[in-house]
Image (spheres, rainbow, N blue to C red):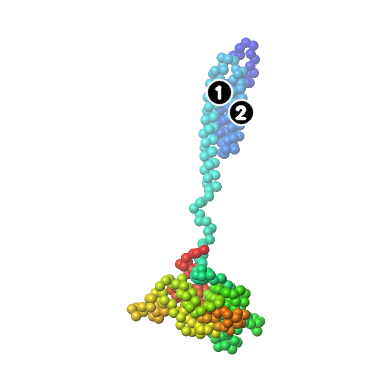
Amino acid sequence: MPAPGETVDPSRVHSLDPDQLAAAVTAALASITTATDLDALAAVRTAHVQGDNAPLVLARRELGALPREDRADAGRRHNAARAQVQAAYDTRLAQLTAERDTRVLREERVDVTLPPARRRRGARHPLSSLSDRLVDVFVAMGYEVAEGPEVEHDWFNFEALNMAPDHPARSMHDTLYVEPAGSGRLLRTHTSPVQIRSLLARDLPVYVVAPGRTYRNDAIDATHSPVFGQLEGLAVDEGITMADLRGTLATFAEALFGTGLSTRLRPSYFPFTEPSAELDVQCFSCHGETARQPCRVCSDEGWIEILGCGMVDPNVLRAAGVDPTRYSGFAFGMGLERAAMIRYGVREIRDFVDGDVRFGLPFGIED
Ligand code: PHE
């Protein structure tokens, strides 16, 4: 009952009576329960829990309008109502938050166990690795790396190398000729034309190694291929002798097969060297002791033929504009596949051209 002089708006007081409070609570709880996500619950919060126009908020403001003797009771009921709604709200909020978190975790999950789209590393071609290693040996001795074209001119490939058009050695160097007929261009049959190119292009003295691809009209079989690699070497200086050739090749053989093996020069013939020789290296597998047990690496020879070499023929020096009365030099040329086959026990030259990465992998991945 209002105190004397107080005017109480019946509708305001009405909002605090037990039925009205109970109705506000019921409505709030129903809305809280039916809110299915956090956005909906946020709207419920405004409408029923804390918004300026939420019935319970409005009712609270009206506490002060109650006659003093009613206030404590109404305040207690209001508090209980509010606590009930707040508790329901908090519970639902926790629930919906957990649901949202679970959903986000599920929907935005990144499966870190998926294998990445990683490209498998290939392998360096064993011939490239071998070639680089051998080139390094010569670079360490002061040589420079020289290159020449694979489509070469007859003059560089043959004539300047002392092989006139009718020279019988040309038949061993049959190759593919490039159109138009009579252009004199062909796929080089050896890396020796780089000797001529180096002498023409460089100042003397010349110390070069030239690794590269070469071609010959050979049917492919286990030990022959129409395309193969060679490593050429050339030293032209004043006073070069065959002793220099021997020493250089001994160093080289050591790099390829390891220390402690003898080498020997066996007389041979090449049109562009005089005298000419083949370099044999003592078999690294049996060390020449074939009498004790048969050796597959050297076929019981005790020696392995490695390369052709010799002192540069004066005609070659002249063709390249070098005075043979002042300068002399040596040259050598080695088949890369052959060296790799011997060194690594590869039985099929075809493996080098097939391009199957599984062949290259065991030789190691080098950068
Ligand atoms: N060019 C020769 C060959 O292919 C090898 C060689 C090079 C021989 C240099 C002597 C000097 O068979």
Furthest-left residue in this view: 292
Q: Position of residue 358 (x, y in %)?
A: 48, 68
Is any part of residue 362 visible from this angle?
yes
The earlier-in-sequence mark between 1 and 2 is: 2
- Judging depth in this view, the residue of 103 and 351 nearest the camera is 351
Q: Which mark is residue 245?
A: none
Task: Determine whether the residue tagged by mark 2 lies in a helix, strand or loop.
Answer: loop
* Residue type of the residue flagged with mark 1: His
Q: CA distance from mark 1 to mark 2?
A: 13 Å
Task: Determine whether the residue tagged by mark 1 lies in a helix, strand or loop.
Answer: helix
Residue at 59 percent of width and 33 percent of height:
44
Contact, mark 1 vs mark 2 (Cβ under 8 Å): no
Q: Residue 43 lies in what quarter of the image?
A: top right
- Judging depth in this view, the residue of 84 and 206 nearest the camera is 206
Q: Position of residue 170 (x, y in %)?
A: 56, 85
Is any part of residue 187 visible from this angle?
no
Q: Give the vertical position of 27 relative to 365 (above or below).
A: above
Residue under label 1: 78
Q: Position of residue 66 (x, y in %)?
A: 60, 17
* Residue type of the residue flagged with mark 2: Ala
Number of disc labels: 2
Residue at 52 percent of width and 56 percent of height:
116
Residue at 60 percent of width and 26 percent of height:
57
Residue at 61 percent of width and 82 percent of height:
319
Asked whether mark 1 and ligand 1 are closer than 8 Å, the reply comes as no
Furthest-top residue in this view: 4
Q: Position of residue 24 (x, y in %)?
A: 58, 27
- Judging depth in this view, the residue of 356 and 275 nearest the camera is 275
Q: Which mark is residue 54?
A: 2
**Relative to residue 167, is residue 182 drawn left or right?**
right
